[in-house]
Image: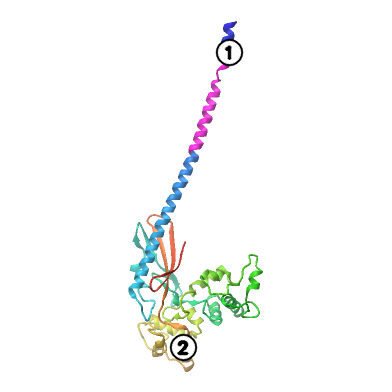
Amino acid sequence: SNSQSHKSKVVIGQPPRGSILILSLWSLCLLSMYAVILGLNVRQKLTLVKRLDERDRLHLIAEAGIKGAIIQLKKEGLKTSDSLNDSWSNNVGAFKDIGIGGGTFCISYDYTDEQSGLLKTRYGLMDEERKININTAEANILERLFKIALGLDDIEAQELAASIVDWRDGDSELSIPLGSAEDSYYRSLQYAYEAKDADFESLDELLLVKGMTNELFIKLKDYLTIYGTGRVNINTAAKAVLLALGFEEDIVDAILSFRYGNSETTEAPHDGGTFEASSDIVSRLSQIYHLSPSELTQVSAISEQSLTTSSSNFMIKSAARLHNRKNTLEAVCIVDRKGKVLYWSES
């Protein structure tokens, strides 16, 4: 009896073998889960580090592209005239798919060809003087641009132009009785603010102005600038910009024909040219196109008030890509003639 009691006590004191197995399995599962979670965290961190490293490399490549473009710009020095034929504007060898640091950069921008109407790519810089300055342009110039570039009717164009003028001017008076906007309108919005009553400091500010939408902004942004004195370079401006300044379409066609060397709308064949100085615009144009007295007056007035033949500020779009990688980075920079950076953004 004592022996049996002793044996039963020994059996009762020992943990069941099944429980040990279950505990072991649970421990193994917990350790496996911990290892998986730890592995995921490490993998995420490694992926993040890789992405950050790629972004840094892309940034350096894009920056190298911008510095290279500035060097090309400085090589030409100060000039009395700038045109789309200059090396800063169109230079495939210097700006297209240039290899550096395990990747390539490309300095380019898309534009609508004035002769064919097709969207094309030019490898080079875009001067800001080809555009209309929204800080200095009069309302009637903006109105014409909005009708030409956006297809707005007279009332819509007038209201949008007046809203831009009222945003930048220093008073709280409406430019036109209806359709424009000052502080009272902007204060009534869900997220209230006030008219700036000062110059635009970035083009994106236009999206704060009454009537401006993302869709309109995308169509307009290549025609507008905040840089420069407000004078437009006749050698680089698009047809829509020249029309907005007040030129008749026949005269604009003659200007473009002179630039591109197309003799279809001019009286004397030529290989294309550059207006060297503002004072030469009338005489050079008169050599290839007969100007009536009214046209002569128009060209003289607009040339004296609104035109130049040189550019001082340039946009550089540098797109960087790494070899065998899908990710890209685009840096957009505005520089002056001396290479001073006035604006920088990356996407």
The quadrant of the rendering that contains the N terminus is top right
- Quadrant for residue 102, please give it: bottom left
- Mark whose residue sits in front, 2 or 1: 1
| Dot placed on the residue nearer the N-terminal end, 2 or 1 | 1
- Amino acid type at mark 1: Lys
- Amino acid type at mark 2: Val
Q: Residues within 10 Å of mark 2 (few under 14, many from 20)?
A: many
Residue 137 image point, x, y percent:
52, 80
> Residue drawn 65% across and 65% down?
190
- Residue lying furthest bottom: 293
Horizontal placement of 209 versus 318: left or right? Answer: right
Residue 267 - label: none
Q: Is residue 15 magenta?
A: yes
Residue 299 - label: 2
Given residues 13 and 242, the one toward you in this image is 13
> Residue drawn 50% across and 77% down?
133
Residue 204 image point, x, y percent:
53, 69
Whether residue 77 can be seen here = yes
Which residue is labeled 1 in the image?
9
Q: How many marks?
A: 2
Horizontal placement of 311 versus 183: left or right? Answer: left
What secondary structure predominates along the stretch shown in magenta?
Answer: helix
Magenta residues? 12-35
